[in-house]
Amino acid sequence: MEETMMRRLRRHAARWIAGGVNGRRCVTCHEPANNVSVSAASVRARFEATGGTDPIFRTHDGSNSPLADVSTVEARRAAYSLLLSKGVIRVGLPIPAGAEFELAAVDDPAGYAGDNANGNELSLFRRPPPSTNLGFLSAVMWDGRETLEKGSAAAIHFDVAHQANGAKVVTDPGRAPITGRWADVGRFKGPILRGLAGRAPYFHNGSAATLADVVDFYDRRFALALTPEEKADVVAFRRAP
């Protein structure tokens, strides 16, 4: 058992160090200094240091659109604006065949999602969870898909507006492009809380800049009516190592 574990650790350590064809390594998006995720602040620092040519800046998943202009520093600054401001990676996923729903409309400022040559895929911007796909820690996978397929029912519906005609308006369809289920539109699995304080910004889309913003969200979402002192206690608890 111990020998098997050590072999796995050595294998994943090699993957952590070795660079891929695009110059990336595991540490490109999973920095130990950011509790094995990546922060918007560190991304911005890398941009300034390299003019936007660090391996994390790649158009297939780092830019707002894979068709973005990255010919100059200022063009790259605009192309990677969501990665720079929210620390999010673009995951391109189409609506699966046989889904219980259909896509009625897409509003993408980049002009790509829902109308492209890649199966009309959507652009889903997600924070990198705190680890890559480790067989001995399957609760977290780099884009969250394995967690959702294997994991528990601990999920929330995030940012869903229900229309009178039965439609749902969402900023991200959540698990639905994986399962094809109507009930999974806007449904997400939260990441593990280990080392949470070091992985700002928070939520799947980086919409909460601080832990206080996270607490405020849940206070509103579940009508908890927390006092300022209780909110401060929760924040202090989550900051604890």
Image (tube, rainbow, N blue to C red):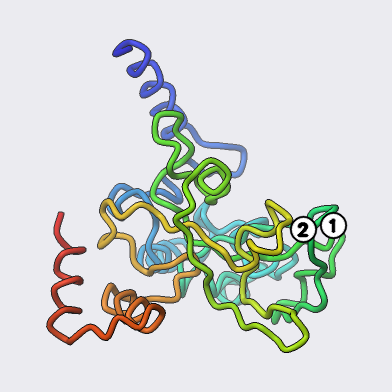
Q: Which element carries disc 1, helix, strand or loop?
A: loop
Q: Amino acid at mark 1?
A: Gly
Q: Cα distance, mark 2 to mark 1?
A: 6 Å
Q: Residue at x 16, y 64 (%)?
A: 237
Q: Amino acid at mark 2?
A: Pro
Apparent side of residue 66 relative to residue 200 in the rendered image (left or right): right
Q: Quadrant of residue 44?
A: bottom left
Task: Give the residue number, with chain letter if any, for mark 1.
Answer: 119
Task: Give the residue number, with chain letter if any, for mark 2.
Answer: 94
Q: Quadrant of residue 124?
A: bottom right
Numbered tag placed on residue 197 in the rendering: none
Q: Which element carries disc 2, helix, strand or loop?
A: loop
Apparent side of residue 223 relative to residue 133 in the rendered image (left or right): left
* First in residue order: circle 2 vs circle 1: 2
Q: Is residue 40 above or below residue 159?
A: above
Q: Residue at x 21, y 63 (%)?
A: 238
Percent x, y of residue 24: 52, 44
Percent x, y of residue 103: 80, 71
Quarter of the image for the N terminus: give it. Answer: top left
Label 2 crowd (10 A; few <14 / some 14-19 / many >=20): some
Marks 2 and 1: CB-CB under 8 Å?
yes
Q: Quick one: 84 or 154, which is closer to the camera?
A: 154
